[in-house]
Image (cartoon, helix red, strand yellow):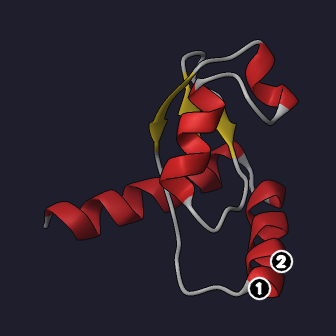
């Protein structure tokens, strides 16, 4: 997930998250970023193949904002505890 300057969250899949993030910052790719500026990679998962990544993307997109923020917070807690 990418956090944007307006506080919104973008969810997508990529084989190279850092490269894709740089593309979004450069204004390439998703229409979502035409009116928003990406400011931070807020959440990422690994260990998926294309099929499972697509399924996980759909599942995350169905989550409420509160659930997405909770998912991000869980990872932050694991990283900094």
Q: What residue is at 62 percent from the left and 56 percent from the top?
A: 67
Q: What residue is at 77 percent from the left and 85 percent from the top?
A: 52
Mark 2 lies on a secondary structure that is helix
Q: What residue is at 67 percent from the left and 44 percent from the top?
A: 65
Mark 1 lies on a secondary structure that is helix
Q: Residues within 10 Å of mark 1 (few under 14, many from 20)?
A: few
Residue 76 vertical placement versus 65 (above, below): below
Residue, disc 2: 55
| Residue 70 appears in the figure | no
Q: In the image shown, does 50 or 57 lie closer to the viewer?
A: 50
- Residue 77 left/right relative to 44: left
Tags 2 and 1 touching, CB below 8 Å: yes
Quarter containing the C terminus: bottom left
Residue 38 vertical placement versus 15 (above, below): above
Residue, disc 1: 52
Q: In the image shown, does 40 or 23 lie closer to the viewer?
A: 23
Q: Residues within 10 Å of mark 2 (few under 14, many from 20)?
A: few
**Which mark identifies residue 22?**
none
- Give x and y (percent) for residue 1: 59, 50
| Residue 26 appears in the figure | yes
- Give x and y (percent) for residue 3: 54, 34
Alpha-carbon span between mark 2 and mark 1: 5 Å
- Give x and y (percent) for residue 24: 64, 33
Residue 54 vertical placement versus 75 (above, below): below
Residue 61 vertical placement versus 55 (above, below): above
- Residue 9 left/right relative to 47: right
């Amino acid at each position: 997930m990418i956090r944007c300057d307006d506080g919104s969250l973008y969810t997508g899949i990529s084989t190279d998250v850092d490269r894709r993030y740089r593309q979004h910052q450069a204004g390439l790719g998703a229409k979502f970023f035409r009116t928003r500026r990406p400011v931070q990679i807020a959440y990422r998962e690994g260990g998926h193949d294309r099929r499972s990544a697509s399924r996980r993307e759909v599942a995350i997109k169905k989550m409420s904002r509160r659930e997405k923020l909770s998912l991000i917070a869980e990872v932050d807690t694991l990283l900094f505890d």
